[in-house]
Image (spheres, rainbow, N blue to C red):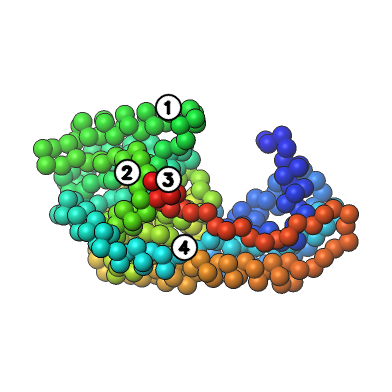
Amino acid sequence: MVPWRREILGSLLSCDYIGFHIPRQVENFVDVVRGAMPVEVLGREGCAPRFLTYGCAVGLDTMTTRIRAGDHEVGLGAHPVGTDLGRIREVLELPRTRDDIGRLRREISPRKLVLSIERLDYTKGTLEKLEAFGRLLESRPALQGEVTLVVVCVPAAREMAVYRQLQTQIEQAVGRINGRHSRLDWTPVRFFARPLPFEEVVAHYAAADVMWITPLRDGLNLVAKEFVATQGIEGGRGVLVLSEFAGAAAELKGALLTNPHDPADLAAALGQALDMDADEAEGRMRQLFGIVENFDLARWGREFLAAARGPAGHQKTTTTTPVATATPIAPGRSQAGNAGAMA
């Protein structure tokens, strides 16, 4: 739909190598190029074992690895950004973080803490999530008074007026749930429409029993990996409920996948997470932490550079088009990291 798509594609196709988070995004790119200009697929291969191929909306079996557009060849690959476990370990060791973790556990206990952290954006599915939480409390009255949902929604820039209506709708949904179900000693939803320092974000990760990440569509979602890293370092057994339309869903085996476009499935997945026994939760988190620890930020950088310098990335072709250097940019912070930076 973008009027200048040919210019954007032309710029990308001047590279020798282009990395995406997951194989599905590689194929999306090839489809877009095919819709704008002639393209020849020169190479395909099976997706790496680390990627889910079934039971996930963004999973694939095979992936294009090389194309020719015009007279230039371009290598393609999937490189999901990892998280910085060293930074999270340092934050967890801070006295302030330990104090925050203890305070959160005292405030919520003996109830279970369900955590949601995301930017204010219609793609993040915040409104759908709140409606599903209300549905769950209605269908399972025994959960009333037994679970608290903490929603941290980092607002958009003030000049982004398009998000004001969404924030109003979210606040109204929070008000409806709390107005209907609150008790003197229990508020079902705690809503924060402001950024939190990263130290507080990590404390919330550590204290949470369930991390509920349900974007309608997301390129990757580093919040999911930060939660897993925190829980794994702490020896926790928190449960990750993740949208199958988030890029990270193709990588994070052990998460409970849910369809955010299906209100019943959203509620059911959260209910399953809350009901999960300790052994299963611990096993799932062990599997998730193994993935996040193995494919960390440093490995992402090494493998991306190796791919760009290797057979798929270093071959030069005869062309009059200037070739851009395929040096990966520094990874941006996750939503939670942005929250800390904004604070």
Counting from the top left corner in percent of width and height, residue 56 is at: 49, 55
The earlier-in-sequence mark between 4 and 2 is 4
What residue is disc 2 on? 151
**Mark 4 against mark 2, which lies toward the viewer?**
4
What residue is disc 4 on? 83
**Kind of residue at badge 3:** Met
Nearer to us in this view, 121 or 181: 121
**Kind of residue at badge 1:** Gln
**Mark 1 against mark 4, which lies toward the viewer?**
4
The earlier-in-sequence mark between 4 and 3 is 4
Counting from the top left corner in percent of width and height, residue 58 is at: 54, 54
The earlier-in-sequence mark between 1 and 3 is 1
**Kind of residue at badge 4:** Thr
Q: Can residue 341 be seen in this view?
A: yes
Q: What element carries label 4?
A: loop
Report crowding for label 3: few under 14, some 14 to 19, many 20 or more residues within 10 A (C-alpha): few
Dividing the picture into quarters, in which one does residue 95 lie? bottom left
The earlier-in-sequence mark between 1 and 4 is 4
Q: Are marks 4 and 3 in contact (CB under 8 Å)?
A: no
Indicate whether 190 appears above or below 236. above
Mark 4 and mark 2: span between their CA atoms?
22 Å
**Mark 4 against mark 3, which lies toward the viewer?**
3
Q: Can residue 211 be seen in this view?
A: no
Mark 1 and mark 3: span between their CA atoms?
22 Å
**Mark 3 against mark 2, which lies toward the viewer?**
3
